[in-house]
Amino acid sequence: MRIRLQIWRQASRDDSGHMDTYNLDGVNPDMSFLEMMDHLNEDLTKKGHDPVAFDHDCREGVCGMCSMVINGQAHGPKQGTTTCQLYMRHFNDGDEIFVEPWRSQAFPVVKDLVVDRSAFDRVIQAGGFISNHSGPKPEPNSILIEPEVAEQALDAATCIGCGACVAACPNGSAMLFTAAKVSHLGLLPQGETERYPRARNMVKQMDKEGFGSCRNYAECEAQCPKEISIAFISRLNTDYLKASLVEPKDRRGKMKSQ
Amino acid sequence: MLTLDSKIPQGPIEEGWTNHKNNLRLVGPKNRPNYKVLVVGSGLAGASAAASMGAMGYHVECFCFQDSPRRAHSIAAQGGINAAKNYRNDGDSTWRLFADTQKGGDYRAREQNVYRLAELSAAIIDQAVAQGVPFAREYGGKLANRSFGGVLVERTFYCRGETGQQLLLGAFSALQEQLAAKNVTMHTRTELMDIVLVDGQAKGIICRNLETGDITSHAADAVVLATGGYGNVYYLSTNAKGCNVTAAYRAYKRGAGFANPSFVQIHPTSIPASGDYQSKLTLMSESLRNDGRIWVPRNPDETRKPNEIPEEDRYYYLEERYPRFGNLVPRDVAARNAKDVCDKGLGVGSTGYGVYLDFGRAIEKLGENVVVGRYANLFEMYERITDEDPRKVPMRIYPAVHYTMGGLWVDYNLMTNIPGLYAIGEANFADHGANRLGASSLMQCLADGYFIIPVTIGDYLSRNPYGQVTTDHPAFKDAENAVRQQQEQLLSINGSRSVQSFHRELGKLMWEHCGISRNVAGLKKGLKLIPELREEFWQDVKILGSGRQLNQALENAGRLADFLEFGELMCRDALLRDESCGCHFREDHQTEENEALRNDEDFAHVAVFEYKGNDQTPELTKEPIEFEALPLASRNYKT
Ligand SMILES: Cc1cc2nc3c(=O)[nH]c(=O)nc-3n(C[C@H](O)[C@H](O)[C@H](O)COP(=O)(O)OP(=O)(O)OC[C@H]3O[C@@H](n4cnc5c(N)ncnc54)[C@H](O)[C@@H]3O)c2cc1C
Ligand code: SF4
Ligand code: FES
């Protein structure tokens, strides 16, 4: 196959960036999209041009590292698929393909197709955990969990933190990501105690990071490679609402000094 | 000669860990914040260690090369995690898990270490559940189990096919809690480049900020390496692209012993490479072998499509060769046999390196729904990658490099022979001997991180005053300069070949000469060819751009430079280990039935290598392994 690529090039955070055109020969339909990018980089290196920087690691759809907007869609045209799991057989000989980084105020471009997603980690730090130390814990079978509830929690926990939902949203909202974590933990009895403060604090942090608000475009769900359901967003909204009805109290500092 | 004091507890194996713990020195809670510990790596081992030590009050800094600690390669583990809970009442116990692991490792691990692992396994499940890991549940709401290769009980806990992801997210969230509490600081997109020793003790590390290219020094009271395995020395493996040996290898060059470098596990069922552009291999869970039948055409010149080949022309080689275990022989046996039939010209697929895994019979017997129900996500993954529907056409599979049992030598406290330098998780050599059983790596990583290192590190720290060294010490400047120099050298070569092309070539070389089965001539050839390739690399590699920016080719070149030295060490170890054991199969040591033939008299030891300088032969020290609790027996999966 021979394709024509239009790729976003940006030397650094401060650079303004632009699209560049590359014609690429010798593309095999069985190549993954990232193998095609490797092939391009090999070609560029040979010609003495700076190769295109892009994030990737596991190349099997689970680490959440790969992140390209392909022909206007986060992770490309195939539903429920990460960039690394997309294959060139889904394109045609002679196609022109547009490749861009995630676009969001909260995810600044670092170089070419690489963005800074540390905002996601800070949202988790605001409450995306069940407080715990390592050490002896209760026997797990002493707290029974309906298999259906465990499965729902797992549906939410399957989020790979890639950020496609943000890139897909016209508003750059991170609601799907946040809702997935709030739902995963809130559905389980272990996470019940911190359920409401968790929702409140994570949403607060989300706003602080500059993510937009949710306007129900549902593009996040459509482009999420793990097909996380927007039903979790309603759950988050309910928890958040309940949380805002009670005055937040944090006695942690006090407890320590006693 | 290295002095290797393994610090194995004496006395009955059941009391070993408890007695040992009771005799360790501790650091008091008030004093812990004064001690700074660097944890390099944020996979299951690193994240659990950093979170646990942070929660205890130590001043922890954690490092990873990805953009978030959640992306460590542990995320990709599929199958599950073992624990001796005996929920199924099928005769499981700590002892049995210990015995299975030791037998699976072909008796090349320390008994006391393996027993401790089995002993801690149940608490790992408790810890994970408390963090909110959504393990599969049965109808009554209790935890579910499944069985895994090489054992006769059901003790594996799982979350669909994404157990590693969920366990890592558990450890990651614990780590995020500690980050929020400011007990831990995280350095992402930061790669370890060297380890700094002062008066023979590990006192810090040198890193490169992958975004800015800054070379930075970090001083501390102890350093923990949790940097994972080195399967990528073969270029093609099931590991993530970034997995590397750099941290462990730099430690080795600073004097840490490297144990059993040639012990590599090759998984029998991955999707075969489809062409030269292939960048990694994807694992298909071995649970598929429960219902799939493995075969190749009997005729090397077969041209018919698989479904048109009648039964009598199909060679079900595992069923014929191993009637009792059939398609469920252990990983190494299945892998070797696949290679054997392909080498005989019977392989299938465009490259000739593949065998069929056929669900036709199972679908006929159980119905398509049942079979698809069991393996839905795997079938989907296979189809996504190959564009073939395994319900209609047999899958094609081939062995792939998967896990490295070898690693930095550590004592019972998980400390290397360099005081203050620890290695945990896949980065150390400790618990799996010459072969790892399925679902036991996750267990080991978390035992190391949640329960062992937080206790044992106190013993070392308490014997040393804190904050003795700062980054002003000349050792840091020297190491920084050496790192810069290597980087500049790489950038100045400006040759004609890409980093990737060298890595591919090294991979092929390693696979051919130090792969599934090994022989003296091949290993000697490897020992000759690797230095030649290394030479060429340093003459002719082409890396564009500068070191003062995000430069992925430069990152890869640094990792490859270490692989190009390390591959030689692997061949050397494989040559010196003049026996077959576990995954290390030497063609000159096999039984009449082509099984691995151990030589316990001469090789019941850990082979530990010591760096002696560039172009010098590394020196071998042997740590003998004692068999007190479990008598030696030979592995036999035929009867
Ligand atoms: C596809 C697959 C499936 C598997 N399935 C199972 C299973 O079902 N059950 C099981 O028990 N095991 C399984 N394993 C094995 C298991 O996943 C790994 O052995 C284990 O996760 C390793 O964890 P770790 O914490 O030691 O290292 P990793 O998770 O690899 O983490 C390494 C960390 O070190 C960091 N790092 C590495 N080098 C550097 C450096 N130079 N500088 C800075 N940071 C560095 C990385 O950023 C990362 O954070 C599987 C493995 C694979 C490949
Ligand atoms: S919700 Fe989906 S798109 Fe968003 S981060 Fe998670 S996996 Fe990615
Ligand atoms: S590279 Fe890991 S999800 Fe794509």
Image (cartoon, rainbow, N blue to C red):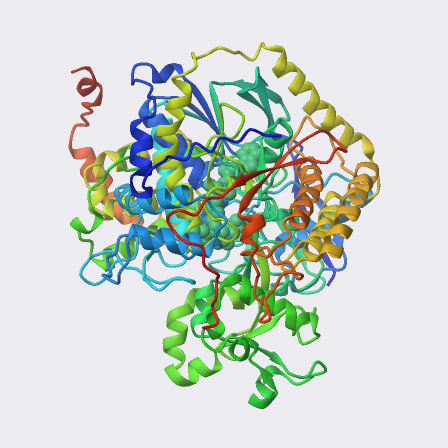
| Front in this rendered view, residue A146 or A127 | A146
Give the answer, above or below, for where B279 lies relative to A121. below
B156 left or right, relative to B428: left
The residue shown at (43%, 11%) is B465
Q: Quadrant of residue B17?
A: top left
| Front in this rendered view, residue B28 or B24 | B24
Q: Can residue A179 be seen here? A: no
List x then y, in percent, for residue A221: 40, 53
B201 left or right, relative to A215: right
Q: Residue furthest front?
A: B601
List x then y, in percent, for residue B481: 69, 19
The residue shown at (68%, 55%) is B511
Q: Can residue B144 be seen here? A: yes
| Front in this rendered view, residue B263 or B51 | B263
List x then y, in percent, for residue A60: 53, 54
Quadrant where the image shows the N terminus of chain B: top right
The residue shown at (53%, 31%) is B4
B170 left or right, relative to B627: left
Q: Quadrant of residue B29?
A: top left
Give the answer, above or below, for where A110 lies relative to B438. above
List x then y, in percent, for residue B307: 57, 85
Q: Quadrant of residue B52?
A: top left
Quadrant where the image shows the C terminus of chain B: bottom left
User: How many numbered markers are drawn?
Assistant: 0
